[in-house]
Image (cartoon, coloured by chain):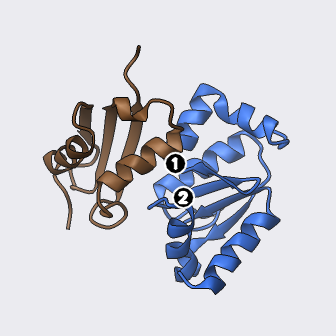
């Protein structure tokens, strides 16, 4: 991955408390797994920013190398990679996600 | 290109020889599977690490030949 892409990814992660790399946008997700995570975040009333990887092929591939995670979506909270769709769903169902957000100082509804 | 359930199971068993593995074919298209894996190698690892271990066992096929592999991983109960 080119340094410029790596820096671009690092900057956007640093600038956002909660950041979702996804296919499409929260209003128009383009993939079921991305839509599932959008659903969890909106259900919890989390304020977040998103990156539509379909609009940036370098970020789409770069984020996989950056996180050592082969698929999209990817959720970052306070610069930490939390997981993809399975993990976010599992954490949500067990209540662990609410705790994670609270401990990170992110308010949930 | 797609993968069969047995190909996936083979790759997982090769990486985790004593694991208990259950593979569900979610859509019958060779591209969307779920796998439940219980392996000693996962003990003490975070979920992200456990899943990364499984993705590595897939040898780079994740996101390429294999579009989706929903994972449920854990160490054996003590």
Density class for disc 2 (Cα within 10 Å; few <14, some 14-19, many ≥20) is many
Pinpoint residue B39: horizontal percent, then vertical percent.
33, 31
Q: Nearer the viewer, residue A3 or A36?
A: A3
| Callouts 1 and 2 on one subunit | yes
- Does dot 1 land on a helix, a strand or a loop? helix
Q: Quadrant of residue B12?
A: top left
Q: Secondary structure at mark 2?
A: loop
Question: Which chain is rendered blue in the image?
Answer: A
Residue closest to the far top? B78
Residue at 19% across / 57% down in the picture?
A: B3
Query: Is residue A68 visible to the viewer in this orientation of the structure?
Result: yes
- First in sequence, mark 1 or 2: give its number: 2
Q: Which mark is residue A73?
A: 2
Find the distance from the CA under tag 1 to the CA under tag 2: 6 Å
The structure residue drawn at horizontal position 76% and vertical position 40%, both measured from the top left corner, is A101
Q: Does any portion of residue A109 appear in the rendered image?
A: no
- Which residue is found at the position 65% from the left and 69% from the top? A51
Q: In the rendered view, does B6 fall on the left or right side of B61?
A: left
- Asked whether the residues under the numbered discs 1 and 2 touch, taking CB atoms below 8 Å apart as contact, a structural biologist would say yes
Residue topped by disc 1: A85
With B5 as the anchor, is B49 left or right in this view? right
The residue located at (80%, 56%) in the rendering is A17
Residue A96 location (% of width, % of height)? 65, 30
Give me the chain letter of mark 2.
Answer: A
What hue does chain B carry in this figure? brown
- Up-down relation of residue B20 to residue A35 (above or below): above
Specify the quadrant that holds the N terminus of chain B.
bottom left
């Amino acid at each position: 991955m080119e340094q410029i892409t790596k820096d671009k990814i690092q900057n956007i992660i640093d600038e956002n408390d909660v950041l979702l790399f996804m296919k499409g946008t929260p209003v128009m997700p383009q993939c079921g797994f991305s839509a599932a995570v959008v659903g969890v975040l909106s259900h919890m009333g989390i304020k977040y920013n998103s990156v539509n990887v379909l609009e940036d092929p370098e970020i789409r591939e770069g984020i996989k190398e950056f996180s050592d995670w082969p698929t999209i979506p990817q959720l970052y909270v306070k610069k930490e990679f939390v997981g993809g769709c399975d993990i976010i769903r599992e954490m949500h169902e067990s209540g662990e996600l609410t705790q994670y957000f609270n401990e990170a100082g992110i308010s949930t509804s | 290109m797609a993968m069969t359930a047995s190909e996936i199971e083979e790759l997982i068993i090769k990486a985790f020889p004593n694991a208990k593995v259950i593979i569900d074919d979610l859509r019958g298209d060779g591209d969307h599977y779920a796998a439940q894996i219980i392996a000693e190698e996962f003990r003490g690892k975070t979920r992200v690490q456990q899943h990364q271990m499984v993705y590595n066992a897939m040898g780079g096929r994740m996101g390429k030949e294999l579009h989706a592999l929903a994972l449920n991983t854990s160490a054996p109960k003590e």
